[in-house]
Amino acid sequence: MSAKHHVYLVPGFFGFTNLGELLYFGHAYEFLKKDLARRGVDAEVVTIVSHPTASIRQRTADLLKAVHETASGDDGPIHLVGHSTGGLDARLFVSPGAQVSESLELEPFARRVRTVVTLSAPHAGTPLATFFLGLFGQQLLKLLSLFTMYVLRFGRLPLSVVFRFGHLMARADDQLGWKATLLDQLFDQLLGDFSSERRDAVTKFLWDVGRDTSLIPQLTPEGIDLFNGGTHDRPGVRYGSVVTQARPPSLRTRLAAGMDPYAQLTHTIYAFVYGQTQRMPLTQLPLHTPAQTAALVQAYGAMPGPTACDGIVPTRSQVYGRVLTAVRADHLDAIGHFDQPAHQPPHVDWLISGSGFRRPQFEAMWKTVGDFLMEEEPPR
């Protein structure tokens, strides 16, 4: 009898797996679970609850705690699938000699890991983190995280909030016209639509975001350079990456987003964060192997330029190990947060980029992930 496989889905920056029906990996979890069952694989798929903006070391300790609780009863193979910052957590988990917890031993579980898959992960950092280090960026980060949870719960933001936020974004580059009272009003209006119990949970989540933001400097290109210097690949582990590249904001993407006022003004949010992410220093762009370069050229028709990104992470920063697939998608499309309300359960988008990513591409992408997880490997 073959051993049970343990697959862990590790969320990214301000992941909110623990907010009831607000599911970060909802669609990915269901698809991967069914896909592995169709293959006849005995597998347990677990979504990880991480401190939203705590350090990579703390988040990796969260991952270790979950693995210890769910995989201690056997010696089956472990697979780590991390979106965004979750990919860095997975890399640290398997790095030989890593110390992430005072109370739990990492090595017995790290040596059982067979694959590490990263999706849209900032292996060379992202300039957006540099922006979020500022006072304005920190306030905006909390508001964006609240937006995400609100849209996943109710389907879209109130237009009054969207118009106010659109005005804020239009003036954000020079910060003219920004007042703390405007952000306070947006917070109050959005939180007021949640039930009392849910409002408490969301408020606690946002408090956690504000209390520990040590992850943010670690995600800058300079911070990740230090992370990469101390984090090493484990021999015998197969590393693969899913790469995303979204269209630059333009008249074309505005038309693709639709003429609904909500779509147009939330597209403004995408345009703003895309502009911040474009500012990747040329000296921080990683070198790629010939095989990685060939995979990117085959997928996109040409090598992505230095400003190419998915709105959150530079595209060339996302490459690590074997490029499993490279797709035209924004940062949240990869985990199922795109606009396809007719699907059951519906896909809900809040970062409307006009990428055109839909369910067929989503299923093909995650099938590729499943292929890699279950790929035959030589015995150890």
Image (spheres, helix red, strand yellow):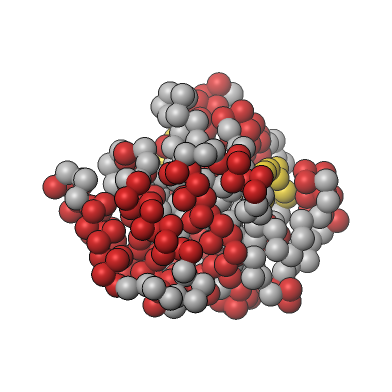
Q: Residue at x 46, y 24 (%)?
A: 342
Q: Position of residue 103 (x, y in %)?
A: 33, 66
Q: Is residue 10 visible?
A: no
Most foreground residue, 180 or 110: 180
Residue under the point 50% across and 31% down: 340
Q: Is residue 52 above or below residue 37?
A: below
Label total for image: 0
Q: Residue at point 21% right, 45% down? A: 194
Instruction: Left or right? Give the position of 153 relative to 326.
Output: left
- Choose between 196 and 243: the one closer to the eye: 196
- Residue in the foreground of this view, choosing between 177 and 8: 177
Q: Measured along the vertical axis of the image, is residue 211 above or below residue 47? A: below
Q: Residue at x 72, y 48 (%)?
A: 323
Quadrant of res 51 = bottom left
Answer with left or right where residue 178 lies relative to residue 227: left
Percent position of residue 189, x then y: 23, 53
| Residue that sits furthest to the left in the current view | 196
Q: Position of residue 377 (x, y in %)?
A: 70, 40
Task: Report the side of 207 relative to 107 (left or right).
Answer: left
Quarter of the image holding residue 333? top right
Q: Is residue 345 visible?
A: yes
Q: Quadrant of residue 275?
A: bottom right
Residue 149, compared with residue 356, is above or below; it is below
Residue 298, horizontal then vertical, whole percent: 82, 44
